[in-house]
Amino acid sequence: MVREDILGGLKNALERGESMQEAKETFISAGYPKADVEEASVSLENIQVNKRVEVPTLYSATLQTPSAPAKPGEKPLPQIKVKTKFNYLLLIPIVIISAVIAYLLYNIFLA
């Protein structure tokens, strides 16, 4: 069974920027059993791997270099092209609803 005090200490050490190896050596030199420290580190690594979440890609970016430099003798700067995914099927109902609202407002206030 994983000891919570070792697990918490390893988490804190990693958050402070220490490597896992340094954190384990610190616990072992402090007198904790090597087997308990190893078990806690393996458990922590498994927790970190399982916490990765798939995030849908809303943007895609490509790096392109321009074909000609801006001025003679200068290196061209790379250009980043960002493409967004847009659902055009949502645009149609929005336009229709907006037109209906505009028509109703026109008839109510100006007619």
Image: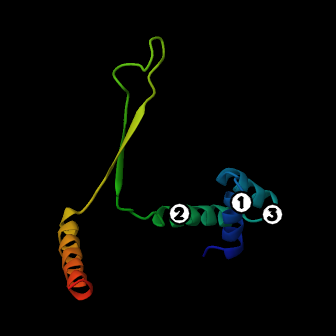
Coordinates of residue 63 in the picture (x, y in percent): 38, 36
Give the labeled residue for mark 2: 48
Q: Which residue is denoted by mark 1 in the rendering?
A: 13
Q: Quadrant of residue 37?
A: bottom right
Quarter assignment of residue 70:
top left
Residue type (three-letter) at the residue carrying disc 3? Gly
Q: Is residue 22 left or right of residue 84?
A: right
Decide which of 103, 63 is in the foreground and name it.
103
Estimate how packed mark 1 is, as few (under 14), some (14 to 19) or many (20 or more) residues with alpha carbons within 10 Å: some
Kindly state the secondary structure of the residue where label 2 is placed. helix
Give the SS element for disc 3: loop
Name the residue tied to disc 3: 31
Q: Nearer the viewer, mark 3 or mark 2?
A: 2
60 or 11, which lies in front? Answer: 60
Who's the residue at 61% across and 65% down the image?
A: 39
SS category of the residue bearing label 1 = helix
